[in-house]
Image: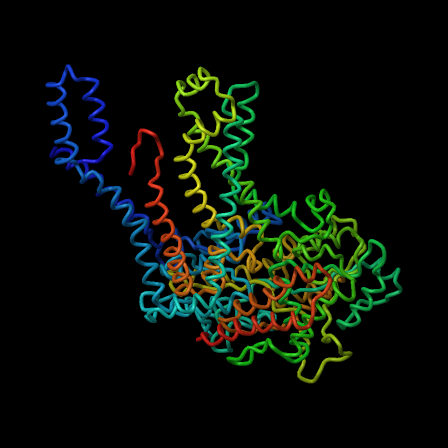
Amino acid sequence: MTTELLDQRNRRNRRNRRKEPRVKRAERKNRGVTERQRPLWLLTPGGLLMVLVILVPLALALWISLTDLDQYTLRRWIQAPFIGLDNYVESFDAGLLHSIWISVSFALIATAATVPIGIAAAVVTQNKYRGRGLVRAVFLIPYVLPSFVVATVWRTMLQPDGIVNSVLGSEGSLWLSGSRSYWTLILVEIWAAWPFIYLMALAALQSVDHEVHEASAVDGVTWWPKLTHVILPYLRGPVLLACLLATLNHINNFTLPFVLFGAPAPDNVNVMPMLVYVTSFQGLRFGLSAAMAVVSLIIILIPLFVYLRAVRLDVHEEGGRK
Amino acid sequence: MRNQKIIALAGVTVLAAALAACGGGDDGGSGGDGKTLDVLIGANTQYPEEFQAWQKSISDKFKAQTGATVKFEQFASANDELTKIQTSVVAGSGPDVYAVGTTMTPTAYSTGAFVKMGDSEWQKIGGKDKFNPATLGISGPDENNLVGIPWVSRPFVMAYNTDLLKAAGIDKPATTWDELRDQAKKMTHGDQYGLAVAYKDNFDPWKFVWGMSVQAGNPLVDGKTAKLQDPTVQKAYETYFGWLTTDKIVDPAAVGWTNPQALASFAKGKTGYFALTTSTATNSLEQGAVKGKWAFALLPTVPPGATSRPANGVEAASILSGDNLLVADYSKNKDLAFQYVKLVTDPDVQLDYYQKFGNLPANASALQTLSSDQRLGPVTEAAKKSVATPFTGAWSDIQLALTNVAVQSLPDLAKGSLSAQQIDSRIATAQKSAQSSLDRAK
């Protein structure tokens, strides 16, 4: 039995000690249904979909990564020659490590920058004031805009003779090529992605018990100690989860770099999804691109797994450890 | 409990049936009443409503002729098209007829999924002779293996500002690249520039480099060997980048321009030449400040640094550009497909298409009737002097590698200096990628 269930049972037992005989009977019945006769077959439709939508394509990708599938063998793709790990060897020659480095560093910087912005915005819109609804709505604009629109608008603004250069007085500066393009990608990603952290932080703030605020007020705590010692600890779990999801979203973001920079992209922003896309759909090397995708998946999974084991996310105070 | 199991089983069965139904099926049949012909065609973002009307009129005509309906499927970009070809090839079902860009025809050919045109097939569409011979140059690797049926041409030309040329005392547009540079220099002063070039375009740069190299006698691909690391290619890049860095005849903002942006800049009337455009730009030019003050001209056909073409140089005025029609090998409506191809390559339909969208006819007699149009003269000439890019499945990679040299050079270009060594090392990278792609070509 999980600790969560134990905790719940103990609490219930304490509350209902007088009614113990009835509760015990009910518990025994409940436990029987939930554990021994769980209708697991009800999972079949979902399980079937999982197999079809996730496992089969994954297995196919693994198979394709071991074959020499390209434009010449595409028509009889099942008979594409098996070449073992050659694609994996070649993918490291084709700039995969560089792309992984760009992707991971870009994602981490973007996440690190969005967290303080998101939390600050959540704190600002926590207490009631006139116009709070409007501010909350405005904060969500970057999040609800499609990535394509965001990238198109920024691309227009960042032209050498665009509005950004005229405001900064740096006519002719290139934002979409060369080394600066890396920082452009991060900047636009931050602009588009911070409301996600904001939403998660706001949700966590809303779940802080009213009593906590009252207790702080009774103890005469000023706003800063209250924020750092009382409120922020409540946010830890949800915000860590948000960080994890946001980082994965950044790493997997294809639309933004594709629309901002086009293909072929400058080397400085040749992120993993772009590399896989160009190899697949412009170079038509499906085997090679599948190998790249598999390597990327493994490389992301390792730290993700370690991280998940280490932090043991507490999403909700009562949610227990998982 | 048993009931629940039965219901769940029923649910699973319905789900499985629904998923199986997603597999879809073919319309089947070999032409005539009640059949549907599926045609994949590029979306026209410039004239979407007119394009819808054109599709309707073709569909009506086709119905009257054959009793079958045409269903048009549109793709937004070359990449979408390629994806559609890939999925259809794998599935063995999809559109019956594809309108494919000329430079993508070799890639489509390499999949082996399209009908090779024999005598009987040519006969069905009205004979091979009805086409402008130049347009057949990129239909297949050789005479006996043609898959692409020419549909429309979009040869590349220059546009120039007649007033600015006249003011600079230039009586006729340049015919060599050196002359173009010198004329552009004369017109560059104040906020006026001699040349508009789209350096950030993802398709333009390689066309200049290919053109200049071919004119100097290097077709870039020799059998299975890539010839990118060659003095002709080096010179081509130096010339192309030099317009901005050393000659200073191009607006520095051009490092961020795509082709439509360069066109918009030229249309403002402050630029002498627009280096690479097609007749589809006519309407945009007529709506700009340059209205009534512009004309088309052939791109120079003498390589940079020379006053005449070397003996092995080719008079390439443009890449062979436009669209080919390909009939899918898996199609169950091949006869209908050829009837459709015949319909849209007949002179009246071709001319109507030109009037509406500015694409030149691939049909020889239709093209001939346009050569009397004075403004269009250079464009029809360019159509005849178009030269096919190498017909190899590796071409899309080579094109990408050539463009990548320009993409990675943009920051240096913006700084205003680009050394020969920098160009050299980027060409070396391109050569490596082109050669590896050619090594794989089958």
Specify the quadrant that holds the C terminus of chain B.
bottom left
Quarter of the view holding residue B320: bottom right
Image coordinates of residue A175 in percent, x first then y, are 64, 51
- The quarter in which the N terminus of chain B is drawn is top left
Q: Is residue B340 visible?
A: no
Give coordinates of residue A45: x percent, y percent.
24, 42
> Which residue is drawn at the image coordinates 21% and 35% (left, top)?
A2
Tally of numbered tags: 0
Q: Nearer the viewer, residue A220 or A255?
A: A220
Is B24 on the left-hand or right-hand side of A202?
A: left
Residue B215 percent across, percent down from the top left: 68, 77
- Name the residue furthest bottom: B311
Q: Which of the colour schemes (rainbow, by chain, secondary structure, one colour) is used?
A: rainbow
At a point 55% along the width and 80% down the height, the residue shown is B222
Is A48 displayed left or right of B261 in the figure?
left
Q: Nearer the viewer, residue A14 or A96?
A: A14
Q: Residue at x 41, y 35 (%)?
A: A236
Can you give x and y, in whole percent of width and height, for residue B409 in the image? 64, 63
Front residue of B73/A277: it is A277
Instruction: Decide if residue B167 is in sight here.
Output: yes
